[in-house]
Image (tube, rainbow, N blue to C red):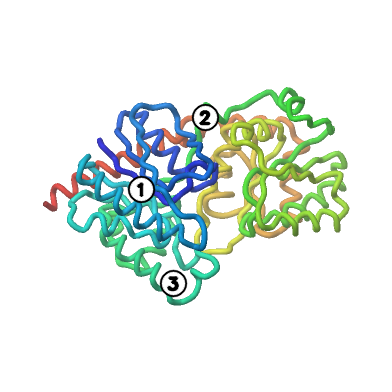
Amino acid sequence: MHILAYCDEDIGVAAGGSRQVLELANALALSGHEVTLVAPQSEQQRVALTPSTQVHTAFVPVVRWGGLRPFSFFWGSLAMLKELLLASRPEVLLWFDSPGQMAPLWALRNSTCPVVYFVNGLPLEEVQGLWRRPPFREWLTHGLRLASRKATALVSVCPEVLVGLRNLEPVDVNRCSVIRNGVDPDRFFPQPQEKVRAELGLTAQGPYIVFVGGFFPWHGLDTLVDAIAAVVKSCPTVQCLLIGDGRTKRALEEQVQRLQLSAHVQFTGRVDFDMVPKWIAASDVCVVLHRQTRSYPGDSMKLWEYLACGRPVVATAGPGYGETVEELRCGLSAKADDPTDLARQLLCLLVDQDLRKSMGERGRTAVVRSHTWAARAAQLERVCYHAIAGMKAAA
């Protein structure tokens, strides 16, 4: 199958959206499909594609100053899509949605190519700044409706997004599929804890609690810091490693100082993506929290990476997080925004090495069996084939 994929992500940066696009493109290519990926030219000039003769990249030059990036990518990608649709005749267009990018709609006006539309968020809840003003929000919502009408199939990482989408635009539920994020178990795998701690220069006794990811309000890291203040009382040698960066970092640093936790909470900053598995392997317990800042929970990529490394997880109770670790019996759930309950669950794991080991092993087994990017790509492959068959039947 020849798949033309389109995204507005900077795929040279190891962020969640770009990682999803790259991993699915890689997995589809490695399973024998020809994948052409249209994306903006990366500032990093580095694309983390798994070696494969089947993956082709078509980079679109963009202007990155003065707010011109979305407009320059629109016109550049429109010309690129028209050329590729005419020259290579793809069997399906896999459109990874970005709010406001309507180039595929224009390019497909005279095409019968089926469209699989991957929507991970709703514009009304995702956009920031100028784009939140009513005229722009209405325009983005209108674009989402048009794209949904054009799509042969719609996909999201969580069912709540599809429900929200159907509230905006009547969509046949049979056209909708949920495909969650996944993990590469060959990159994220269990490693000897003491060895990686030595490599990373971690000399404190521990135990170690680890969070890896962006510092954003919806990750609830202030709740984690408050919980550490309670954990220290029962486990005075505990260390919490916050690995990453983001817009809440300064507030978190001030919170750590105010609670006199500088000896227990470390900010490592951003680390190279290839080193992330080692930081996870250095942990005793990993944390993934979710604060309800929008109507849908999303799906945390870091959760699958923690589990692939064989580490137990404490996650916020609810869909996509606590429910997942409880179902797989690979961790514990804590009440949302409740540092006391979070501290209780962390201590439950920190004091029981056998429980941590058994949960870690179950998590790794579950991931390898059902939650790899290859498994997700197989789901997406079936959606694409179904879309192709549906378009042929309609024709």
Of 116 and 78, nearer the camera is: 78
Q: What is the residue that sits farthest to the left in this orientation?
A: 395
The amino acid type, in three-letter code, at marker 3 is Phe
Disc 3 is placed on an element classified as: helix
Question: To which residue does mark 3 refer?
Answer: 136
Disc 1 is placed on an element classified as: strand
| Crowd band around label 3 with a 10 angstrom C-alpha radius: few (<14), some (14–19), many (20+) | some
Vertical position of residue 58 compared to residue 132: above or below: above
Q: CA distance from mark 3 to mark 1?
A: 22 Å
In percent of width and height, residue 243 lies at: 69, 43
Question: To which residue does mark 1 refer?
Answer: 6
- The residue located at (73%, 22%) in the rendering is 195
- The residue located at (75%, 45%) in the rendering is 267
Q: Is residue 172 visible?
A: yes
Q: Which mark is residue 185?
A: 2
Vertical position of residue 188 compared to residue 129: above or below: above
